[in-house]
Amino acid sequence: MSRVPRLTVDGVVRRANEILLVQRAFDPFKGCWALPGGFVEYGETVEEAVRREVAEETGLLVHPSGLAGVYSDPGRDPRGHTVSVVFYCEVVGGTLAGDHEVQALRYFPLTALPTLAFDHEKIIHETVKVM
C-alpha cells in the first residue's frame, strides 16, 4: 500500500432530476453503483482524466463545466487513501454505452438512489443541491 494518496476524478452527470451512475463490475464495491470516474494517469490533467473516465465508462463525451468538490477522507476507498476531484459534467456527444468496468449504467432519480460505492452518496447529496 502506498504511503502517498492517489489522485482520482469523478463526474456528476445530470439530466433534469436524475444522475448518471455506473454499476461496478469489479471490487471494491462490485455490484454497487457509483459516479463514473477513476484514477488520473501520469501526465494527465484532472480535466482530461474526467473526460477520459466518463467516456470509457459511459460512452458519453463530456465537458467538465465546474468543480463540484474535492473529497479526501483517508477511509473513502478500501484500497488505500485516495483524493477525488469531482466535476460537474455537461454531455456534449457520444452514445450511452458501458465498457468492461461496468455491469450496467443508467440515470437514477435523485429521490431514488441505489446503494452507492465509496463516499458517492455524500458527494451526490453535497453537490446536487448547488447545481
Image (spheres, rainbow, N blue to C red):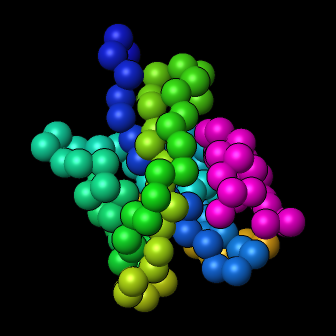
Residue with the most extreme top position: 3
Residue with the most extreme right position: 111
Indicate whether residue 26 is drawn in magenta. Answer: no
**What stretch of residues is rendered in magenta?**
110-131
- Quarter of the view holding residue 18: bottom right
Instruction: Report the front residue among 75 and 48.
Output: 48
- Quarter of the view holding residue 15: bottom right
* Residue 113 placement (x, y as % from top left): 79, 61
Q: Residue at x 45, y 79 (%)?
A: 91
* Residue 92 placement (x, y as % from top left): 39, 83
Residue with the most extreme left position: 43
Instruction: Report the front residue among 127 and 120.
Output: 127
Q: Residue at x 31, y 55 (%)?
A: 47
Q: Residue at x 48, y 84 (%)?
A: 96
* Residue 59 placement (x, y as % from top left): 40, 78
* Residue 4 placement (x, y as % from top left): 33, 16
